[in-house]
Amino acid sequence: MRTDKPWKILGSEIKYKNPWMQIREDKVITPLGTEGIYGVMESNDSVMIAVVNDKCELYLVRTFAYPAQSWNWELPGGGGDQQEPIEASKRELEEETGILASSWELLGKTRVCNGFMTEHMAVYLARDLSFTGEKEVSTEQIDEAKFFTMQQIDTMIESGDINDAQSITGIHLVQKWIARNV
């Protein structure tokens, strides 16, 4: 298995920056020996939370995705804001949904889009739930939130009602956990 880095970086320049991300353009020599450029989006890591109740149903939120200009069902989650992933998960879950969980387990970590992003995503399982009834007003425009059976979720993925790749990754991880533990 290769461990070398076949791309050589000749220089880097930040082309765009805001509080959540920056776009870096690298001047490179490719593995074929030609000079070129490579764009990289650097951002804070993120978290997604698979909220599972006693019936093994999964909690989804319906949010408006600004870049896609569409409403989508997805797992609760968000930016890590440079917190430890478990702390960011607890914060995001309570802020978005008003849910507290007393049982937390890391299901896995993935790269969001390793072809051009540096972001990693941690997926946590949240169980033993209580509802505070409070949620923070946010810009995420959560329209609806509820529990779904795994059969309903599979149908929603097949129909395109769930089309967020990060959520589908999290759903896959929680389905594997359920198959092993329930």
Image: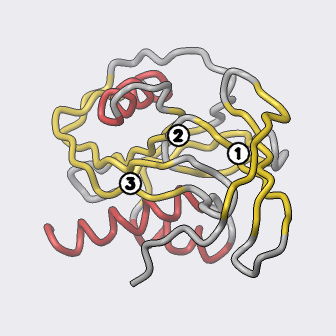
Residue 144: % across, % down: 59, 38
Disc number lying in front (2 or 1): 1
Q: Residues within 10 Å of mark 3 (few under 14, many from 20)?
A: many
Going from N to C along the chain, the mark reached first, 3 or 2, is 3
Q: Which mark is residue 19?
A: none
Q: Name the residue rendered at 85%, 45% in the picture.
A: 69
Q: Which residue is mark 1?
A: 41
Q: Give above or below for 29 relative to 141.
A: below
Number of numbered discs visible in the structure rendering: 3
Left or right: 28 as drawn, with respect to 87: right
Residue 132: % across, % down: 33, 18
Q: Are marks 2 and 1 in contact (CB under 8 Å)?
A: no
Q: Name the residue rendered at 61%, 37% in the picture.
A: 43
Q: CA distance from mark 3 to mark 1?
A: 31 Å
Going from N to C along the chain, the mark reached first, 3 or 1, is 1
Looking at the rendered structure, the kind of residue marked 1 is Met
Q: Which mark is residue 58?
A: 3
Q: Quadrant of the C terminus?
A: bottom left
Looking at the rendered structure, the kind of residue marked 3 is Leu
Q: Nearer the viewer, residue 118 or 141?
A: 118
Q: Which residue is mark 2?
A: 145
Residue 138: % across, % down: 62, 19
